[in-house]
Amino acid sequence: MRAHLGDQLVVESPATGAAKRDGEIIGLHHEDGTPPYDVRWSDTDEVTLVFPGPDAHIRHLEHGGAQAPCEADPGDIGRRVAAERHRQGLSREEVAGRARMSPGYLAYLEESPADPTLATLIRLADALGTTVAALRGGGADQPPGQGRAMMHPRLRDLSPQECRTLLSTHGVGRVAVSAPDGRPAVVPVNYDVVDDAIVFRTAPHSVPAEAAETEVAFEVDHLDEALSQGWSVLAVGPAHVVTEPEAVRTLARRAHTTPWAGGERDMWVSIRPTTITGRRIAPDDQ
């Protein structure tokens, strides 16, 4: 048995042959890749020294298979590192210290089309609480939430203030409408929160434009793939088209981003929530 850093150790059930536990190999003790290995287990996030038995095999990160990451432009890795660091509110100095590298080198990785080594990626993934595959964009085209559930999860309701705080971070949400053919539809939109109203811009006669002058549901959420936890917020209320010229100029000026879909989208829709509810999945001790 030989492995490389970043490969996956899979332990199978002797009875069924199905995987019963897996983890990422983050440490080698022999240059030729033979056991033992330091393994970060996906179900507990703990790191242990493992001497694999006959029920274990290596799933190689670099050599195809379902777990192999997709190729990414070198600059994409740095952008993903920076985005995850900003999402967690961490400074470069904090992440560099955790990853045992200089802040200057981390700045170079984030700002240049760098191609870091696998060992560097493993240290960065560990520092950010994510995986090498995630930093490489291996799951970019996969739906979120494919990881294992945490061992002791708890689902709790969020207070209205917690919901408003999460909603106010802006980003991408989903609005539920009736499409022109009468069928229900859920479409993603770039949104902002301005003066307690959820606002987004779209094109007339588009599916999101059907929200205007109706009562709609708007949902936003976040999943932490590394920790198998997350939250969702649902706002319900009437939607109206913003037509007053000064209000339109104010919204355009305060918008955090232009629509990712591009094109002419100069119709602003405002949703005034009458109810806001939310839930969070977190460890039982939080």
Image (spheres, helix red, strand yellow):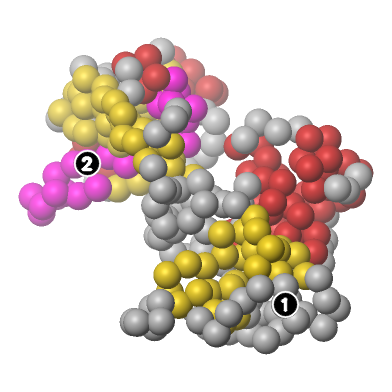
Between label 1 and label 2, give the one nearer the viewer: 1
Q: Position of residue 174 (x, y in %)?
A: 32, 42
* Viewer-nearest residue: 33 or 233: 33
Q: Residue at x 45, y 77 (%)?
A: 12
Query: In what element is the residue under mark 2?
Result: strand
Magenta residue check for 183: yes
In the image, taking residue 111 as reference, residue 11 lies left or right, namely: left
Q: Residue at x 67, y 45 (%)?
A: 128
Picture disc at residue 160: none
Q: Quadrant of residue 103?
A: top right
In the image, taking residue 111 as reference, residue 10 lies left or right, namely: left
Q: Residue at x 40, y 26 (%)?
A: 167
Residue where numbered disc 1 is placed: 35
Q: Quadrant of the C terminus?
A: top left
Which range is magenta?
164-186
* Viewer-nearest residue: 36 or 150: 36
